[in-house]
Amino acid sequence: RPIVDLMGTTETPSEPSELELDDVVITNPHIEAILENEDWVEDASGLVSHCIAILKICHTLTEKLVAMTMGSGARVKSPASLGDIIVVAKRISPRVDDVVRSMYPPLDPKLLDARAAALLLSVSHLVLVTRSACRQPAARHWVERSLAAAEEHMAVLRQAAMATESDRPPATEAFRQEQSAI
């Protein structure tokens, strides 16, 4: 995004304390359009950084789980178990795409929460299927830490989604407001 100067001063004072309110002038002719565009507010919400963190955690978990599966070739319970891992792993990529698409403005916190939760659920499913197939207890600790870190980011997304619900009037109240306007 381009950097836009919203304010300027008519003169440059030698000290900040010399600046008077009358010296501040709005210099951008497009100020109204800039202020009406709320994309910058949504960027400031910090939700995208939590989505990116969840994406990174899920990516790392998926890579490590697949590598662990490939590395334990002879220890996999059955070929069917390997097939299950492949089927579950293939479900992750579309969920990643969904999360990335939901990060484009305008941000909808409820959509971000739902799509990130779907991704995390898919990765958690991969964790369960891989654990069942490979039986590697040493991997349990880093998997649990990664899932816990992802859940911390999910909690922020959930709070933002719930906040948008409380900002809206209940459906019956919205209906009454519509009826009174008619």
Image (cartoon, grey):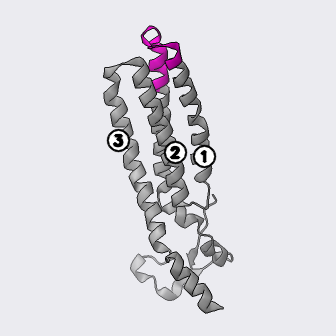
Q: Residues within 10 Å of mark 1 (few under 14, many from 20)?
A: some
Secondary structure mostly taken by the magenta-highlighted segment of the chain: helix
Q: Is residue 10 visible?
A: no
Q: Is residue 181 visible?
A: yes
Q: Estimate the x, y position of residue 3 in percent, counting from the top left.
A: 60, 62
Q: Between marks 3 and 1, how big is the CA–CA gap?
A: 22 Å
**Where residue 148 is drawn, which disc sits there?**
3
- Above or below 95: residue 132: above
| Mark 3, secondary structure of its residue | helix
The numbered disc on residue 118 is 2
CA–CA distance between discs 2 and 3? 16 Å
Q: Dot 2, how many residues are within 10 Å of its Cα: few (below 14), some (14-19), or many (20+)? A: some
Circle 3: is it few (<14), some (14-19), or many (20+) Cα within 10 Å? few
Tell me if residue 84 is in the magenta stretch.
no
Q: Which of the numbered marks, if any, corresponds to residue 98?
A: 1
Between residues 121 and 161, which one lies in front from this camera angle? 121
Q: Of callouts 1 and 2, which one flags the residue occurring earlier in the amino acid sequence?
A: 1
Three-letter amino acid code at the position of disc 2: Ala
Read off the magenta span: 64-81
Q: Give the SS element for disc 2.
A: helix
